Image: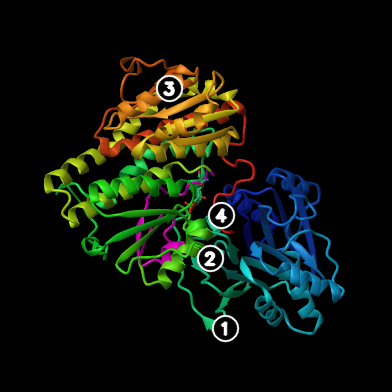
Amino acid sequence: MCGIVGIIGTEPVAVRLLDALKRLEYRGYDSAGIATLHDGKLERRRAKGKLVALEKRLSDEPLGGTIGIGHTRWATHGKPTEKNAHPHISGGVCVVHNGIIENFKILRAELASDGYDFVTETDTEVIAHLIAREIDAGNDPQAALKASLERLEGAFALAVLFQGHDNLMIGARRGSPFAIGYGSDDQPGMFIGSDAFALAPFTNRIAYLEEGDWVVLSKDSATIYDEGGAQVNRPITTSMANALLVDKGNHRHFMAKEIHEQPEVISRTLSHYIDLGNEKVDFSSLDIDFQSLDRLSITACGTAYYAGLVAKYWIEKWGGLPVDVDVASEFRYREPLLSDNGAALFVSQSGETADTLACLAYCNEKNQKTLSIVNVQESSIARGSDAVLPTLAGPEIGVASTKAFTCQLTVLAALTIHIGRQRGVLSKEQEVELVHSLVEVPRLISEMLVEEAKIDAISQQLVHAKDVLYLGRGIHYPLALEGALKLKEISYIHAEAYAAGELKHGPIALIDENMPVVVVVPKDGLFDKTISNCQEVAARGGQIIFISDCDAKTTGCDFVSQISLPRGNEFIAPLLCAIPVQLLAYYTAVHMGTDVDQPRNLAKSVTVE
Ligand code: M6R
């Protein structure tokens, strides 16, 4: 997703803007640009591709100035070319933008008929022209911005420079998050960015713009206005987005680092929800009576949706509460019927996913009790929910979600026990047993990570595949879905997941000796049924990679290779299965030489529809 940064200070900004943009790279982008005001003039440098290309442009043609804005663009309207890269300029107005202007076609036609020339295919260019038209009509920058905002439809964050005003920057937020950083004596100035992470090298004093807010920045002040134009205060918090946390350590990729962090972050998350001394889960601060609920609806996207699917199996079996799980982009438009006595749970790493956020707004409107599981506690989803259950995964930089997923599962597993106890489905003894099994997870994952070289070797079997099938049954079906998603997003190999029982209803036609089939099958009540499906695959020459805590040889089935899982309580199996499917995708992508941390076309946080 596009990233924005702005600095207004006393030191040269171009290099610092570039540094901040590097910290937004994780969001995904395909071009970038920076503009500054220098000696009263606007100047910009833009480049297609990665930031190294922009860095090269800046080194060939440096930019002066102590005020500037920068942008990483994830193309929505118009190809990822230099011409379409931000910032966009009209007259003396210079704009960077994240989001989508939904009425841009109407505005474009109107502005073109007023004589404003369009040189890009972007929706953003209308913002620059709109503001410039207001300036041309004699308005000052503030009035011009305010009048322009009233014409824009859609979700966006934007930052604007005005030629002739070298102590002024204006930012605005509708839908997309925006953080304001307050400088200090050591690092004077004011900062604005898509997240606190981008601003971490400059300041940890952060305020967040609320929906509809806009802000007028000078070198030493930020004046915030709400949508109606009234001046407002937004609290300044101390951000935890420490600059050191973006280091890859000894790992080649952030994804590898984040896979390896899982024992630690799961432990941290567990200690937040488990009272080990009393061998019980602790949700004492959660004000929801699960006993009286008749339904829980879970909504999320991508990997977070698969965490929700696992939770459906957990909560229905061990919590005794009916659960619906929806992909957010479907839920928001299907006018779902919600129970009068239901609660709605949203799962999101970033807490900013536009579709999930829209579902939260819908459920709030329908008077559902809303609860969110998020990794970014200052996020819009966290702030818009009645209750928040944090995952303590720390910043996740790799676009492919790994540690956030297992931390989501950790919270959902603990929540399942809480629900089971409240609804009288689980006895105290069962709670103790499940709690004990959960606290084993970090150790078991550490043991699996020691064996990762085996998965590296097995991944060679996928490198030349054109298609890969993933199978799983019951609670392991979502893990098959997650494995297929991981593989396709970072290796670009087509992968599909099926509930193993569905195989014979169609996908079995695909099986031949060129088709690797990854089967996620820890020992549980459905094990034998899945083994029968494996037989069907083997009989047709399919190349099976068997992920299980049982020895493949004992099944009588012809497997190509086995990835062994440690044996734990069946309750924690989804958490353990997550590791091999992540590693298999990771090593396949490494062997193929793809951009593991920033795969093509993908954004870390999807803040547009
Ligand atoms: O930030 P969120 O958890 O709301 O993001 C949801 C999905 O966009 C995300 O999980 C996506 O599917 C990941 N790239 C998967 O690895």
* Residue at mark 1: 228
Q: Amino acid at mark 4?
A: Val
Image quarter (top left, top right, bottom left or bottom right) of the C terminus: bottom right
Q: Quadrant of residue 291?
A: bottom left
Q: Which residue is pictured at 49% across the width and 48% down the height?
A: 302
Is 606 positioned to the left or the right of 125 in the image? left
Which mark lies nearer to you, 3 or 1? 3
Q: Residue at x 55, y 79 (%)?
A: 226
Q: Nearer the viewer, mark 2 or mark 3?
A: 3
Q: Is residue 333 above or below residue 478?
A: below
The image position of residue 443, as x and y in percent, is: 29, 33
The disc label shown at residue 606, or none:
4
Asked if the residue at label 2 sits under 8 Å from ligand 1, the reply is: no
What is the secondary structure assignment of the residue under circle 4?
loop
Q: Which residue lies under the disc numbered 2? A: 184
| Separation (CA) of disc 4 from disc 3 | 39 Å
Q: Is mark 4 within 8 Å of ligand 1?
A: yes
Q: Quadrant of residue 601?
A: top right
Circle 2/circle 1 CB separation < 8 Å: no
Q: CA distance from mark 2 to mark 1?
A: 30 Å
- Secondary structure under tag 3 reads helix
Residue 391 forms part of the magenta stretch: yes
Residue 69's spot in the image, x, y percent? Answer: 68, 62
> Closer to the N terminus: mark 4 or mark 1?
1
Extent of the magenta region? 370-399
Hey, what amino acid is under mark 2?
Ser
Give me the C-alpha separation between circle 2 and circle 4: 32 Å
- Which comes before the other along the chain, label 4 or label 3? 3
Task: Depth check: give the residue in front, 9 or 242.
Answer: 242
For discs 4 and 1, the disc positioned in front in the rendered view: 4
- Residue depicted at 26% across the width and 50% down the height: 416
Residue matched to label 3: 536
